[in-house]
Image (cartoon, coloured by chain):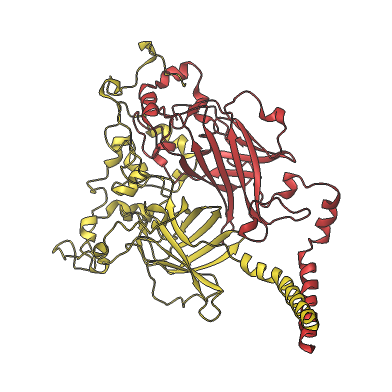
Chain colours: A yellow, B red
Amino acid sequence: MRESSMRGRGSWVGRLAALALLPLLASIASAQVDLSGNWRPIDSPDQLNQAEGPSPVDYVGIPLNQQGNEMAATADPSAEQSELYRECTTWQVNYFVEGPFNIQMSPIVDPLDGNDVLAWHMSGTPDRQPEVIWVNGHAPPSPLSLHTYAGFASGHWEGDTLAVHIIDLKDNWLLRNDAPESNQATVDMFLNREGDRLTMLFIVRDPIYLGAPYARARTFQLTAGSPSYSIPTANDCMPAEVIPGLSDGYHAARFLPGKNPDLHIMDRYHIPPSVALGGVDQIYPAFQKVLDKHYTIPTGYCKAECCAAQGIRGTQCPVPPKAAAPAAAGAERSKSSGAAAPAHP
Amino acid sequence: MHGSRLVAAAGLGLLAAAAVWAQPPPHRAGAAATHPMSAQQQAPVDLTGSWGSIVTQDWLYRMVVPQRGQYADIPINLRARQFADAWIRSADEAAGKQCEAYGAAAIMRIPEHLRVSWQDPQTLKVQTDAGMQTRLLRFDPTPGQMHTAPSLQGNSVAKWMPYLEGPGFVGAAPRRGVHAHYGWLQVSTTEMTAGLLRKNGVPYSAQTRMSENWVVNGDPEKTAWLTVTTTLDDPVYLQVPYVLNSIFQKEPAGAQWDPSPCSLSR
């Protein structure tokens, strides 16, 4: 009887202590949202860019300043491939939201107590350097420290959002078409977990090449399975070959101003070179008034890069039966033709 | 035995501390004890003010009107393609249908400025300068407000998703008297009339259901960003749900506001 009573009282004390500790445990748990898992992109902005990469001298929507314009417009990708230090270049951190591939998140837990999350490890394909996001107040490295393609990332929680600030990045390309990014660039990244979705907002600031923040967003879905590594690891490093006259291995030749053979590549969209080179103003709505002076809707029917790239999201652009294809090869039919617009069901 | 007392005392102390910890701040608890908090009072983030589109994504399909047949990025089905291939801009313009490209499913992608304000404590009003449209996001709509005829902007039901204590609590009904300081807005829109996703004829149907997450982030440079993640589910014209993000930046009130009518040519 006594033994039973003691056991009961001991149990009561234990329960009380456990109950009392619950709020504390909850507060520890609530300090961080679980981001672990394999995340699959479910939106498709600029989808054609994700497959073959953006066209050369297609910098529309990038707030490049004048120096950025000049760097981009004179870049010669073939010569850059002979720069030895770029042999093992990985894509910049912003390619976590630019590319079509999954990302993986996993916590780095304090090995001593096995509980506290010290950092989040974010990885994608092998051609992107994994990002370690320190959330434990890890001090930043010395200003003289080596810059890397991942940089130094520190984060803190704002509710269910992980706010990340990245510094010490190595100079790289903002996009695969040689839009430049300097080693002075910083990235602010917000990982907003919304149920089984993760929306990432990326904001790149670069005092050397950008005149305004470059913001991109992407939404991912938590998904089972392994990451979608579709790029062989062997491709991580591409052998560079010094080309006499174009490169000494460390410096590459550039096109002279106005001599880039791709300068008019955006003419197919009726976008003049002055706009194709990007610019600060063109990311704001008021730029439409500037475009009124430059732009006319191309006539005819789209012939190239008209549909989603096949296979990226498992959806393909439907091909209509030949009889239903646009008869006039897409020429904008006029009111006088008497044709009526189709009606919604 | 002595150890048990110590444990019990420690437990009671912690329990007392936890009870204090669990209490809402007095100035909030008092107000909530008698009246339920309105959506405006519950707002975990401030969406009001002026916001401007930042067009860095899909620039070629948003800042300019793309060519006929340019359907990249949208998971259209064959029926949508046939509709768009047969669509005639001039016919829609002559019929006064320019605003079909400014319906709820497309309006957040138009380069524009937003004015967000509380029409009443339960309704957020979102006005656009481009196309001069108004969306009403109702937190607690009456049946009469919801069962109306389909319209361009449809019926939108809004719900705060407050972050209170942890992931398990996100989306839970806010506890009486507790004001969350983080969270986002979830909006579900139905009862839309059919419209255009893209000004080259890509359609969406009246059966479209739209859900949106409105998230505000503030960066170290003191810039506030609004990201609206839209998911369109259209059984008539889409193969799979179409997910897209629209980014806005906070602006000084009214500085850039430039009302313009609906247009299919710009």
Q: Quadrant of the N terminus of chain A?
A: bottom right
Q: Residue at x 63, y 65 (%)?
A: A30
Q: Residue at x 54, y 70 (%)?
A: A135
Q: Is residue B44 visible?
A: yes
**Which corner quadrant of the image does residue B23 belong to?**
bottom right
Residue A230 rendering spot, x and y as whole percentages? 30, 56
Q: Is residue A174 above or below residue B229?
A: below
Q: Nearer the viewer, residue B196 or A193?
A: A193
Q: Is residue A24 left or right of residue B150?
A: right
Q: Is residue A195 left or right of residue A277?
A: right
**Which corner quadrant of the image does residue B217 belong to?**
bottom right
Q: Nearer the viewer, residue A295 or A227?
A: A227
**Which corner quadrant of the image does residue A171 belong to?**
bottom left
Q: Nearer the viewer, residue B23 or A66?
A: B23
Residue B97 rendering spot, x and y as whole percentages? 50, 21
Residue A19 rendering spot, x and y as whole percentages? 73, 70
Q: Is residue B63 visible?
A: no
